[in-house]
Image (cartoon, grey):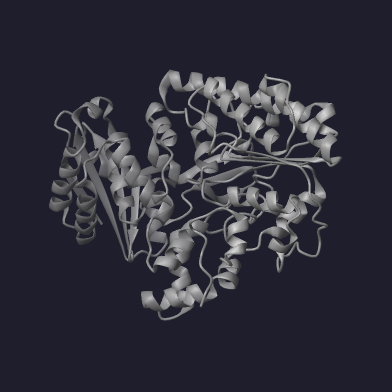
Amino acid sequence: MPKAVPLDTSSFRRIRLENKLYVDKTKWIYKMITEGICYFLSRPRRFGKSLTVSTLKELFSGNKELFKGLYIYDKWEFEKYPIILFDFNGIPIENREKLETGLRDELFSIAKIEEIELSEREIVRLLRELILNLYEKYQKFVVVLVDEYDKPIVEHLGKAEEGIKRAIENRELLENFFGVLKEASVVDVLKFVFVTGVSAFAKVSIFSKWNNLTNLTINPKYADFLGYTEEEIFNYFGEHLKEFCQIQGFKNVDECMERIRYWYNGYRFSPWRDVRVYNPVSVMNTLKEGYFSNWWFETGTPSFLVNLLKEKNYYIPQLEELEVTEEFVSAFEIEDIPIEALLFQAGYLSIKEVEGRFIKLGYPNIEVKTSFSEVLLSKVYKAGPRTKKLAEELGKALIREDWGEVKEIFNQILAQIPYPLYGKADEKFFHTVFYLCLNLLGYDARAEVLSSRGRCDVALTYKGKAFVMEFKAGEAAESALKQIEEKGYAKKFISCGYKKVIKLGISFDIEKREVVEIVTSF
């Protein structure tokens, strides 16, 4: 019988004691602890950051038996060191006062367990005093582990000026607090420091002035540290995989893996190493439950991302073909957040290609593309509950080439969107909604598809057909079709061997909030 997958815990101790399935990541942990002292790692939620912190806690606690059979077992001495662990998933972050109180409570709680008296009250001095007293008591270097350091910041983003104010206040507190770890007297007694988060914010001391901090986020040697490689899926989930493929009725494992790959693979974290990993929580849920679903999104979509997209009036289709430079993943300011960098670090975008200094970003897989599109339609465009069903009907009508039905169904979708949102309606508004609806179906829909003479609004490919679309608001559909012809938007699809290339010009009436005309040519 295969081992149970650990979906209900991120505790390394529980996983090992309960003999649950553990994908051995201690090779990378051994590399870290033997090659350096201070590290930061950014990864999306549910990618194993908390499990890594838990693993490090048990390792530096000297609990060797928990590591029996793992890579690191016979390579490390497993001495016991004093440990300070901050888990920001459990610390109040509503405002600076509650954050400060939460940090102070954590420090006193550790001191009580260690039977250490603390005389200071100000949290920066408290942290310094606790570290130095732990060293003095045990005559051992101190380990500091910090999980989700940026939660007190990101939870307030996308909440207008008041949210930015609280994020800045929390950032300033964290800057002073973590600044202690750079002081000479403290650095001299540190054994190891490991900090995790979703993003890297400038002016927090661990990034602004800590010169010996190693950021592993895009380091090629750690590109496959978290997440599952295909090799790991075969090695650790072989029995689960065989059973799942049989349940799904696939002819063979290769065909089955192709489908799993389509759903959950595609996360590339380093521009300098082309290795892709699977979303671990999605793979485990799929193999355990026996069917495909948007598991990662069911664990929660950060509201701050959606709110930021709304605040910035961001043109969503351009997420499909973004080009950035490698500097975009460096620490950034709260006051000027590059939404693309946040989306990359949060796992909604991934590295697709690298050309010289330029990195092309896009959705990592179909789970992210379809689920994020549904969230955006619901939260940004306030589309009603019928939208998903209507989108399915829209896709079928499009494939049937029933243009009257396409027009009618899309107008029903537009009617789901509240009237006040049409105040800023333009061509991009209408074609964004159309694009998101196609994404809901899992179709290969692309926006802003580049040709030698420009970009077409939306292109869809399906079973040998290519649909090349251009949208116009307040102009005749014929002018949209003319633009497709003049700019040669369809040529790349013809040259790629599609059996049929259909050009669609679509016009909207902004006042009536509807499609007024669709014209086509072949």
Identify the residue at image location x=39%, y=41%: 317
* Residue 189, horizontal then vertical, whole percent: 83, 35
- Asked if residue 159 lies left or right of residue 77, the reply is left
Would residue 214 be seen by someone viewing this image from the given angle? yes
Identify the residue at image location x=18%, y=51%: 406
**Relative depth, front residue between 326 and 181:** 181
Q: Residue 76 is drawn in which quadrant?
A: bottom right
Above or below 332: residue 400? below
Above or below 12: residue 20? below
Tell me how many marks there are: 0
**Relative depth, front residue between 137 and 420:** 137
Would residue 275 be seen by someone viewing this image from the given angle? no
* Residue 92, horizontal then vertical, whole percent: 51, 30
- Asked if residue 128 lies left or right of residue 297, the reply is right
Split into 4 quadrants, where in the image is the C terminus?
bottom left
* Residue 336, horizontal then vertical, whole percent: 53, 24
* Residue 385, horizontal then vertical, whole percent: 21, 45
Above or below 459: residue 289? below
